[in-house]
Image: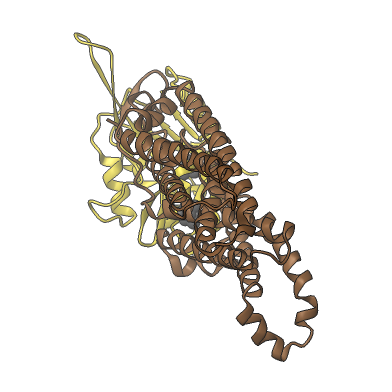
Amino acid sequence: MPELQDTWSWLPAIYLFLGGLSGGAFLTVALIKLFKPGKFKTTVMGGMWIAVAALAVGLFCLIAEVEKPFQAIVMFQSFVNFGSWMTIGAWILFAAFIVFLLSALLATDKVTDWLAKSWKKLPEIQGTLGKVLAIIGAVLAVCVAVYTGILLGAAPAIPLWNTWLLPALFTVSAFDTGLAAVLILAAFVERDGAFAPIRDLLEKVVMGLVVLEAIVLAAFVATMQGGGTNEAVSVGILTSGQLSGQFWGLVVVVGLALPLAAALAQVLLSRKREDKQVAVALPVAGGACALVGGFTLRFVVLAAGIHAALVSPAVLQAVEGISIFL
Amino acid sequence: MGKQYGFYADTSRCIKCWACEVACKQWNGIKAGTIARRKVHEIDSGKFPTPTRTFISMSCMHCAEPACEKVCPAGAISKREEDGIVVVDKNKCIGCHYCFFACPFGVPEYTDAGMDKCDACLGNGVKIDEGEMPHCVATCPTKALHFGPMDELREMQSQKTAKKVVSDSTRPSFLAS
Ligand code: SF4
Ligand code: SF4
């Protein structure tokens, strides 16, 4: 039985999950803000703070993983090789954190009221500034989501990771989990009917994303199974090996099937009701399942990413035609 | 660019005495029970009743296109112009382990000081430009391990049955026979 990847611990899995969630959540509320200006302010503000907090905790986990964290945070010294995706990613994450934080501060009335006392022009430009930040932030949010997959995808010696399908998979899952977090929040704060059409739309987006994620996941698994011994052994850990319980139970059933069912139920139930309201429990349960699935996906992909030189006896070959036992 | 130096392992001579591994640890001050820059691998091939065991000593292969250098965010890994040896600046290394995920041979290992791998003994004072040999090569009692400019090694290898190194995406500077 192949041993699981242990060069990186589970900390990067938390980052991969929270980074994706942060990007997805910011993108969702930025779109709400841009297309429904001035509305659903609590959800927009809350979603932005979720994005800030998730990214902060995620970055903390990522930095805690390296051997010299204090040296790593001196970014202009430690992230200098722009031929490396990790360098590009680090600076994207840095920029995203700043923009997410500024957006969140600007969306918080207490902060803007206080600022306006000394900065008289703020109320005039606040709207435009918020919009500009939302647009830049939305672009960065997509980059943050994609980069979670690129970080692993750009590692050439790990057969399970070295495919563009991985960034695709993590990006869809990022949008999915970020949207889930915003919908959970909205279930509590948006109790009047005004949000119902948005909720209806977003639940349909959830369904679309779940279907898309299932397709990308299936393509990922199929590509790996057909890819060669290394790939097949790695993906076998997920589909039939040590992590198959987590994979089928938590990623596929809890992370995909249940959120799909919950979203479908909401769309159907709200049709029947005049006020388009649904119980809080449904979106919360559906969202929570999506989050559990999203985290487990990152965890199992990280753990099953065995190095090509270690993955299977056939690849313990450094010299053609003969196997080497390390 | 100057010459590309590399290693050549002649499996027909290696007797798995581990002298190269031990010399490497000794000269580079590597604590026992931690990492190993050089490892003697055993290859079992053939089936009963004629099984064969072959031994091969391997370390970093100072690739022509080192994948480790490309992915290192801190720019801690560099390939020397003059001899093509791939070296690590441990002060710059932040210990992110990304180079391990890039190297096709899983060579990079880590200590508290940072990433650690073979530097052809440049770090302990061997002057390869003056023809001095890394300690593993100098120690090898059977002359199974060689070091030098690749063209000279190729010349030596051509006297034997060459074995091809499988993963050549990084063009390793390593020959085997
Ligand atoms: S063998 Fe690995 S560590 Fe050595 S130069 Fe090549 S890629 Fe880098
Ligand atoms: S562990 Fe050190 S040498 Fe390796 S990629 Fe990270 S910073 Fe570079």
Q: Quadrant of residue A136?
A: bottom right
Residue B62 appearing in the image: no
Q: Colour of chain A?
A: brown
Above or below residue A42? Residue B24 is above
Place of residue B81 in the rendered image (x, y in percent of width and height, measured from the top left): 61, 49
Q: Give the left or right position of residue A76, taking residue A319 as reference.
A: right
Q: Residue placed farthest to the front in the image?
A: A274
* Closest to the observer, B127 or A67: A67
Q: Give the left or right position of residue A151, taking residue A130 as reference.
A: left
Above or below residue A198? Residue B19 is above
Residue A50 appearing in the image: yes
Place of residue A259 in the rendered image (x, y in percent of width and height, measured from the top left): 47, 42
Q: Chain B is drawn in which colour?
A: yellow
Residue at image coords 80%, 79% = A124
Q: In which quarter of the image is residue B58?
A: top left
Place of residue A290 in the rendered image (x, y in percent of width and height, measured from the top left): 46, 46
Residue at image coords 64%, 52% = A198
* Closest to the observer, B48 or A29: A29
Q: Residue placed farthest to the top in the image?
A: B49
Q: Residue placed farthest to the bottom in the image?
A: A118
Q: In which quarter of the image is residue A132?
A: bottom right
* Closest to the observer, B142 or A315: A315
Residue at image coords 53%, 54% = A183
Above or below residue B175? Residue A322 is above
Q: Quadrant of the N terminus of chain A?
A: top left
Q: Give the left or right position of residue A147, taking residue A312 as reference.
A: right
Q: In which quarter of the image is the C terminus of chain A?
A: top left
